[in-house]
Every structure is written in C-alpha cells, then in structure tokens.
Amino acid sequence: MNSNEILSILELQRNYFKAGNTFDLNKRKKKLKELSKNIKNNIELIYEGLYKDLGKSRTESYMCEIGLVLNEISFILKHMNKYLKPRRVKTPLAQFKSKSYELSYPYGNVLIMSPWNYPFLLAIEPLCEAIACGNTVILKTSEYSVNTNSVIKKIVSEIFSKEEAYVIFGGIEENKILMNAKFDYVFFTGSKKVGNALYEAQAKYMTPMTLELGGKSPCIIDRNVNLKLAARRIVFGKFLNLGQTCVAPDYILCDDSICDEFIKYVKIEIERQFGKNPLENKNYGNIITNRHLERIIGLIDYDKVIYGGRYDLDKLKLEPTIMDNVLYTDKIMSEEIFGPVMPIIRYKDNLEFLNYINEHDAPLAFYVFTNDKKKANFYINNIGFGGGCINDVVIHLATSNMRFGGYKESGIGSYHGVMGFQTFSHYKSIVNKSTHIDLPMRYAPYSKKNDKLIKMFLR
C-alpha cells in the first residue's frame, strides 16, 4: 500500500472513533465473540499458515498461539464489565463532601506492529485487548510470515469493518509510513533496532506506547537441583519454535561441578523430544528465512560444539546445538541468538555472572533452577529483568493473570489480562463534588485559623 492509501484508512478510523462508534460495550463484546468463533471456524487455515511459515506442528500451533488467543478472548469477555466500569477510590477528608473515581477511556487510533515468530498470537492478542477497550486498530503484520498473514487478514476483515480494524501487509516502506504517522497509541513487538526507530519517530507526537523487545535471557543451573527435570524443561523452552521465542533461555550458566551431568541429560532430552535426526522430524519446524538461518550459523563456534550443529539451508533447519565452555567474549554472546543454539558457560563464582548480567542490557526473561529457596530469592531480587520462572522456563507468559512485558532495554510497558485493559485505556481521575456543602478554609483571605484547619485535614 502507498502512503495515501494507508493514511486514508487511518483517517477513516480517526473519524469513526471521534463519532463515538467504538464506545458501546455490548457491541465490543459481540465483535470479540464473533472473532473467537471465526478463529475456530478457520483453525485449519491457521494451522496451515503456521506450518508453511515456520513448520509448526498442530500441537505447538494450538498450545503456543491459537489456544492462548482463545483463552485471552475468554478472559476479556469475562472481565470486561469489571475492569472497564468506573472504579471508586477513597476521597481525602479535605475534599469533603465528594466522590472520587477513575474512568477508563480508549486512547483512540491504535497501531499494532506484530512480529513473525508467533505471527498469529502476537497480532491477534493485542488486537483483542485494544478492541475490548474501545479503540480502532491498524494491524501491521511482519513481511516474513506471509501465509499466516493471509489468514489473519481473512479472519479480521470478516468481523471488523476497515474503520474498526484493518490489516496491512508490506515491508520497509509500509513500516516507514506507519512509523511516521500520528497515532494515539502504539504497540510494537519485535527487535530493539526497529523498536528504537519507532520510539524516535513517534516522539514528535508524544505518543504513548508499549515496546515488547527482547534480549539475552540467562538461565542459571545451581548444583542443588533435579538435573533430569531441569534438562527436560530447558530443552522444551530453548528449542520451542527452534529458539525463535523472545523469552527462550538464551544462554545457560551452569555450576561447573554438575555441568557434565547436566549436558548428558540435555542430550538425552533432545533425542527424546526431537529424535536422533531432528532435521527429518516434520514437527521440529524451521527458521523463518535463509537470511535468519545464516545469521545464526554465523554465531556458532564449531570448535565448541559438542552436540548437533548440522543444518539444511534448503529446508531452513538447524539441529538443536550445544556449545560448551563458552566465554562471555565469544561471538555467540554478542547478540540475542533467536535460534536453536544452547551456549553453556560454566561457573564457579556466582557473583561473576551476577555482575555480568547486571552490567549488560536487562534481559526480557530470567530463569533459575535450584532447590535452594534462599538462592532463588537472592537472584530474583538482585537481577533486573522483565519476568521469569524458578525451576521452569517460558511458561510465565502463558497466563492472563499476570502482566507480561520488558524492563529497561528489553521493553517498555506490559500487557495480558488485566494489564491489557490498563495498557489500551487511559484512566481519567474524576472528583464529583457536592454543592450542598463547601468548606471555606481553602479560600483567601487566609488566617491562622485556616492554617490550623488545613494542617488538621492534610497531616
């Protein structure tokens, strides 16, 4: 789409919102119910799109994308009345007699820019939350997940008019047009590079936004742990979607005294979950493009590979790969891997890695495996990160009862469940003052008597 076409859609949505067409709560509920039904009716097309783009199995597609979206819609519909109604708050005695409350109000015209790694989940979930709060939406999908994008376009256009929600395809040119257009709220999931450019472009409009970025998320393996279970859970989270997950454990920090045993269990788990030849496993998936695969391969030091490492450029596949005795200065540690490579750093001094983590960009996720509650609490309380788990990985984002978001360099703002309502709504603070009584002490001319009364009310 060219600039005129995109901006005309935005203008239609702007006028639609100004006319008050999104304010009817029952209408929003109806649309979300229809969306949920339409997702179920098109589930085979979603499966097909995700398989063509990322090689995702039906189980993984439902567990990590479709099911989470349907669950979020159910949560929204169940709680809309509660979270969007005026919320009474206490009124200070100095403001007697009055009532105070917060009133949710939609921002207006929202831009959502979604990524390719979970193309259905990370497009539709924020769209649902934005619509629930009474906004209009322009949804810009990633240029790489073309098959899933087509299904998203079909599903959205069958439920929403272009004034309500509209899906835009395209690449760099479309991104530039949208990034420089004026929106009332922007929600972005993707790379830090694009996120920074978007943040800078929208600064001239003072646009509030949520940035869901990423980073190198560490995973600590303490000596006091169930290694077999730790390996099983870490292999699941690390190689889910071939590591193309923003909260995947990026690198492992393993106590040197138990590292060899941990590696043994990791190898067993890789073969148990993906077979002895993952490149031939139809449920293993693929890297999104050849360029992305070559970038990941370029990070690998094959002198340190102790397992895996084979790849197929034609199938866009890379085996689960383990690198041992990795150093903080190795190339694999220079950027977020976003692929099926597990670098293992052995440690003897936990303060060394604690300093390393805190001196670098804050990670989106943090994981620690230990049966020592004091150690777990120490790490959780002394490392800055977006969210995480103790004795598991990834699962903290799969709930509507907790917020999900980054910290410092890994993102701004959060969403999911209750936070979804708060993210896509502005809250007006209202005091409704009675006209039957009026305390005189605030009015000039002031006196010592007034001062005493003011201090009595405001201490």
Image (cartoon, helix red, strand yellow):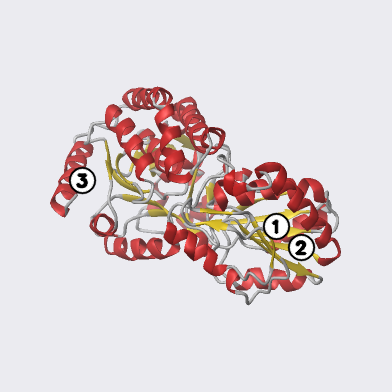
Q: Earlier in the sequence, mark 3 or mark 1?
A: 3
Q: Residue furthest bottom?
A: 329
User: In front: 77, or 216?
Assistant: 216
Using the numbered discs, state the Cα–Cα distance from disc 2 to disc 3 in whole angstroms.
51 Å
> Are the residues flagged by discs 3 and 1 in contact, CB closer than 8 Å?
no
> Are the residues flagged by discs 2 and 3 in contact, CB closer than 8 Å?
no
Q: Secondary structure at mark 3?
A: helix
Q: Secondary structure at mark 2?
A: strand
In the rendered image, which residue does mark 1 sit on? 380
User: In front: 94, or 82?
Assistant: 82
- Which picture quadrant has residue 275? top right
Give the label on residue 254, or none: 2
Using the numbered discs, state the Cα–Cα distance from disc 1 to disc 2 in whole angstroms.
17 Å
User: In front: 183, or 365?
Assistant: 365
Closer to the observer: label 1 or label 2?
2
Decide if residue 304 is in sight here.
yes
Residue 391 rendering spot, x and y as whole percentages: 74, 48
Using the numbered discs, state the Cα–Cα distance from disc 3 to disc 1 in whole angstroms.
43 Å
Q: Is residue 10 above or below residue 190?
A: above
Closer to the observer: label 2 or label 3?
2
Number of callouts: 3
Q: Earlier in the sequence, mark 2 or mark 3?
A: 3
Query: Which corner quadrant holds the C terminus?
Result: bottom right
**Left or right relative to 22: residue 250:** right
What amino acid is found at the position of numbered circle 1 in the picture? Ile
What amino acid is found at the position of numbered circle 3 in the picture? Leu
In the rendered image, which residue does mark 3 sit on? 10
Residue plotted at (23% across, 33% down): 20
Q: Earlier in the sequence, mark 1 or mark 2?
A: 2
